[in-house]
Amino acid sequence: MLRIAVQTKGRLNEQSLELLREAGVTIKEEKRKFLMRASDFPVEILFLRDDDIPQTVAMGAADLGIVGYNEVAERGYEVDVLQKLGFGGCRISLAIPKNDEYTGVEYFNGKRIATSYPNVLKRFFGEKGVEASVHTITGSVEIAPAAGLADAIFDIVSSGGTLITNGLVEVEQVLQSEAVLIGTPGLSDEKMAVARQLMSRFESVQKGYGKKYLVLNLPVAALDEAVKILPAMRSPTVIPLAQSEWCSLQTVVDETELWTIIEKLKAIGAEGILVLPLEKIVL
Ligand code: PRT
Ligand code: ZN
């Protein structure tokens, strides 16, 4: 039985369980326990704080784990990063008071930097030859400069709203992060086979992220034009309609391009346009 560690609560919990569920790994939610067996796949789920996931996987107490890459980089335990999971995106950045003039990384020489990621920061400063004093604090790092505890901070940034609220400005993006699937190095062939199966399912789910299924009616005469507009995986599916001069067209489009494509299709005579959610793409 493969054991996979997932964050108990917090930012990655819901999307980790959602990804597992979409991949066919479900647990009965009513009575959440520390360790739960999935009902439809040979996997059990171990709920942990995200800080503990890299070590637990490195030790082999869990075979796999879903955790932010930032935690993997900070903790430094030996684990295999098997797959990027496409959610929990953020970066760890250096930020300084907004009225300070930033002159480049040498700005940090002799400064006090508050962070929950001292190892990543010390590595960065080491590479850049910066001599700064790194103060490890857990909790609200962003208030440290205003409280006089530090000159600058090194913290997770996502929208940037927290920095603005605290009068800080991001000056160096040091590490890009997202949720990743990690594994114990040297898993048995049997466990690796199950892990591969899971990874392939995760990939199918991820391919569906940000995609929509588009169905529309089109005059047959406009078909060539429509094919040029549509970025279908191979080519769009075309189905004849009862009225011979019309056809129905089905295809997958990226959500970011959806409206542009719809407007172009309407301009060449498309009607009855349906936009449907897309769950998975299995290639
Ligand atoms: O209880 P446990 O220890 O398990 O959880 P935690 O409190 O340590 O972590 P949690 O749940 O806050 O975050 C889990 C993971 O989510 C992190 O390790 C990151 O990989 C990822 N993640 C993605 C984030 C963010 N986005 C994020 N915005 N983690 C934290 N933040 C915080 C950040 O610390 C800062 O305070 O949000 C604030 C900045 O957000 P913006 O949007 O204002 O820039
Ligand atoms: Zn944590």
Image (tube, grey):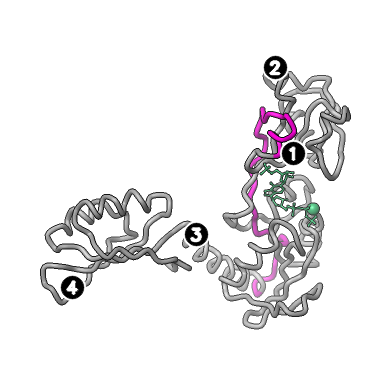
Q: Label 3 to label 4, Cα distance in Å?
A: 30 Å
Q: Which residue was labeled with disc 4?
A: 240
| Amino acid type indicated by mark 4 | Pro
Q: Label 1 to label 3, Cα distance in Å?
A: 27 Å
Asked if the stretch drawn in magenta spans residue 233, the answer is: no
Q: Which of marks 2 and 3 is in front?
A: 2
Q: Label 2 to label 1, Cα distance in Å?
A: 20 Å
First in sequence: mark 2 vs mark 4: 2
Magenta residues span: 162-190
Q: Which residue was labeled with disc 3?
A: 209
| Amino acid type indicated by mark 1 | Asp
Q: In this view, does 249 lie to the left or right of 45?
A: left
First in sequence: mark 1 vs mark 3: 1
* Disc 2 and disc 4 in contact, CB within 8 angstroms: no
Residue at (69, 19) in percent of width and height: 102
Which image quarter: residue 171? top right
Disc 3 C-beta below 8 A from ligand 1: no
Q: Which residue was labeled with disc 1?
A: 155
